[in-house]
Image (tube, rainbow, N blue to C red):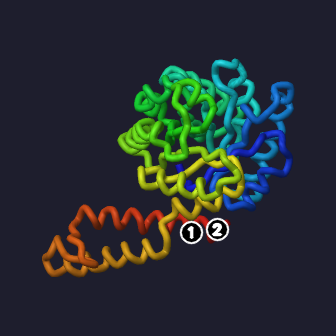
Amino acid sequence: MKPTRSMLFVPGHRKGWAEKAVAAGADAVILDLEDSVPTPMKAETRHMVAQTIRDLAHNHPNVGVYVRLNALETGMMGDDMEAVVIEGCNGFVLPKTYGARDVVSADALATHFERRNGVKAGAIEFVLSLETAQAYAECEAMLAASPRCATLFAGTARDADVSRSIGFEFTPDGLETLYLRSRAVLAVRAAGKDFPIVGLWQDLKDIDGAWKFARDNKKLGFRGMVAIHPSHVTVANEVFMPSQQEADFYQGMIDAFETAEQKGLAAIAYEGMHIDYAHVKTAREVVAMHKAFEERRAAS
């Protein structure tokens, strides 16, 4: 998965909204075929989403393009894939999964429609949306079920599928989901994936709450956030991107250590802190992430 700070949901049947998402600065858009689309409009929306994928790929090639499919249990996932497994689609958000078997089934469908639609094998990646108790309980096995699995999207929304399935009562502080979110971060990182994703903040009137939600989850280890409103894209982009000040601090650490290393030293004091190889590895990761986002922004 490309470095992704912000993923913005866009109802698939809303013409022009994807362009607004790009204008808001979203690193990736999620074109929705599921909960935001009225059931009678599912069929026509698939074709609208396919055209939006083509338009975004042509006009904004640096923006990630994902589609939230209808859940496997609805029987509509195959119909969705038939229309949207096309060039320009980076991946699918798989909703309401219940375990590794669902991932295997979705993988088989994706493989079939890649071949049928002339898309490179394995091109479509999966973002696994954790919205059920079973998914959280099996998240490690789900990530291992297919090489398509790029990351987990740790859902913690109020009054939504996940809170109903698990039974927690949402609070802004999030203590009731701390274990769930921690488990998702650990599963993603243990699987060798770099970008665990969290979401989402639903109170559109409380922008301060959105900032706190993003900052708290960054501290926990998340690298990006799913949003439902353009105003939250700025929040996610600023919080989850290392600042220029951070990049300068860590580049200074790298430079100081490399100078010391040439003198036969592998442990130094930098800005009053003990530094050795472990700290420099972290510094290089932060600097590389900052550079990747800067290059992506420059190419947009």
Q: Is residue 46 above or below residue 60?
A: above
Around disc 2, counting alpha carbons within 10 Å, would you say few (fewer than 14), some (14 to 19), or many (20 or more)?
few
- Quarter of the picture containing the C terminus is bottom right
Q: Which is nearer the eye, 223 or 289? A: 223
**Amino acid type, label 1:** Glu
Image x and y of residue 212, in percent: 53, 56
**Amino acid type, label 2:** Ala
Image x and y of residue 32, in percent: 73, 38
Asked which quadrant contains residue 50, the reply is top right
Q: Residue at x 73, y 29 (%)?
A: 80
Find disc 1 in the rendering and name its residue: 295
Q: Is residue 207 left or right of residue 48?
A: left
Image x and y of residue 39, in percent: 81, 26
The disc label shown at residue 299, or none: 2
Q: Is residue 235 above or below residue 77?
A: below
Q: Is residue 93 left or right of residue 117?
A: left
Tell me whether the residue at label 1 lies in contact with that at label 2, contact meaning CB atoms closer than 8 angstroms: yes
Around disc 1, counting alpha carbons within 10 Å, would you say few (fewer than 14), some (14 to 19), or many (20 or more)?
few
Secondary structure beneath label 2: helix
| One can see residue 103 in this view | no
Q: Which is nearer the eye, 27 or 8? A: 8
Q: Residue at x 56, y 30 (%)?
A: 163
Image x and y of residue 204, in percent: 70, 50
